[in-house]
Amino acid sequence: MSSESETAVSNGAASNGTDEPRESLSVVDNRTGRAYELPITDGTIKSLDLRKIKVSEDDFGLMGYDPAFTNTASTRSSVTFIDGDVGILEYRGYPIEQLAERSTYLEVAYLLIHGELPTKPQLDQWTHDITIHTFVHENLKSFLQGFRYDAHPMGMLLSSVGALSTFYPEANQIRDAENINIQTIRLIAKMPTLAAFSYRHIRGMPYVYPDNDLSYAGNFLSMIYKVAELKYQPDPRLERALDILFILHADHEQNCSTSAVRAVGSSQVDPYSAIAAGVAALYGPLHGGANEAVLRMLRRIEKVENVPDFIEGVKKGEEKLMGFGHRVYKNFDPRATIIKKACDDVFEVTGVNPLLAIAKELEKTALEDEYFISRKLYPNVDFYSGLIYEALGLPVEMFPVMFAIPRTSGWIAQWRELLGDTEQKIARPRQIYTGERSLDYISLSQR
Ligand code: CMC
């Protein structure tokens, strides 16, 4: 067998005859004794290079096995940087702490999507464009009214965002840059409207149309809370706290829902359908549904005195401590630190949520316990966000919806990056087949 990357070796290691370090990996296939040299680029080897490693000419070649993509980079991306070991999160290079302190959600959405902070005229135009696209087609109201009175609003959101693709059929022209820009604006603008309509539906209250005089967060609060008053005026502290939560949730590189958006988007479907896939992925309790699960957990624990028993149950593997642990963060989740501070600001307006004491005790107990220390389990973004949402008067079913609204800008930024990435193709993983082969069909009467 011959291969460009196959090299003669001595002592089991590929060598170029010098002691110079090379950006490559030498591998010996002990089945054949052959050695291979695989190039290393950006700290990775190309999985496809493994296919050159074969036992015979007709062998398919070696594959990597990585069921949950725990050690597989699926893309190059310049959107979000995370260093989970030291708790760093940056959008387009800007630290999350600075953005949460000094920016606004719409500015961050622009940054994620366009790659740079906007100038003042750019931000004004962007804000204007998003504000004037907040209304949805009246038929979407009838569509939402078809749901049961107790429908989960996340299920309503994922269906209605998917349904938007039928209102904008031209959205499937994904090679038309202008078209992509307008669908981007529509998605960011209409998500809060769909979310608020879903909330009003489960509350049995009339849907409130967007108020384009208000900020992005302020308008959302108006669509949620407005009752009989002529104009709803959001409390600026709540408006700012919500805007910060939106900033913190805007993107998080290749997480489950973003990977879903990218995988579905790689089929070149329209963005509404791809984003619906992201909402579906976010719905699950291990992802965006975790904030809902945290609140249900805190309510079940009921009082601070029950915390030790609960923690013992977690350690015995009876259940998980929801809002703890992260695939990437193994030190602390910087978003959790910022949210803890936002909690105080919100509680100043709404009064302290009694569940906060249970949450703080859980955190304290877990952070001192060997089980959590040794597994590097720390509070994640969902541990405290639910307490804020509850203080805002939102029911737990709305919590994942509150995550989906801002994550839309991240999903779109990642989807747009995918469209422009010439290395990408339709996502299509391989499998290790474990089933039967070549069985003869047995007619029904003989089984
Ligand atoms: N409570 C108790 N034990 C846990 C927890 C937890 N929350 N999370 C992980 N572990 C244990 C796990 O049982 C395993 O123990 P062992 O080594 O003895 O088998 C060890 O820690 C490693 O966990 P893992 O399941 O291999 O970690 P993962 O990277 O596959 O899972 C996770 C990450 C976030 C899904 C998981 O930590 C979890 O289920 N947390 C609770 C749900 C949650 O809060 N999700 C929100 C994530 S942040 C928001 C977002 O991005 O969506």
Image: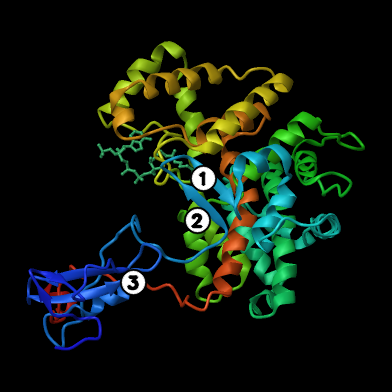
- Which residue is the site of mark 3? 46
Q: Are marks 2 and 3 in contact (CB under 8 Å)?
A: no
Residue 357 image position (x, y, % from top left): 52, 16
Q: At 35% across and 16% down in the image, what residue appears?
A: 308
Dividing the picture into quadrants, the one containing residue 189 is bottom right
SS state under label 1: loop
Q: Which residue is mark 2?
A: 257
Does the closest atom of ligand 1 sit within 8 Å of the Cβ of label 1?
Answer: yes
Given residues 333 and 150, the one toward you in this image is 333
Q: Residues within 10 Å of mark 1 (few under 14, many from 20)?
A: many
Whether residue 166 is visible here, answered yes or no, is yes
Q: Is mark 2 within 8 Å of ligand 1?
A: yes
> Label 1 near label 3: C-beta < 8 Å?
no
Label 3 Cα neighbours within 10 Å, binned few <14 / some 14-19 / many ≥20: few
- Identified at 26% across, 67% down, the residue is 64
Above or below residue 365? Residue 440 is below
Relative to 443, say whether 163 is above or below: above
| Percent coordinates x, y for residue 447 in the rendering | 13, 71
Mark 1 sits on what residue? 288
- Residue 389 higher or lower than 155, as above or below: above
Picture coordinates of residue 278 (x, y %)?
53, 58
Task: Give yes or no for contact between labels 1 and 2 (Cβ–Cβ under 8 Å).
Answer: yes
Compare marks 1 and 2 and give the one earlier in the sequence.
2
| Spatial CA span between label 1 and label 2 | 9 Å
Closer to us: 220 or 379: 379
Looking at numbered disc 1 in the image, what kind of residue is underneath it?
Gly
The percent position of residue 383, horizontal first and vertical second, equals 50, 32
Estimate the spatial distance between the alpha carbons at disc 3 and disc 1, rounded to whole Å.
31 Å
Q: Quadrant of the N terminus?
A: bottom left
Write the residue at 31% across / 35% down: 375
Q: Looking at numbered disc 2 in the image, what kind of residue is underneath it?
A: Ser
State the mark number for residue 237: none
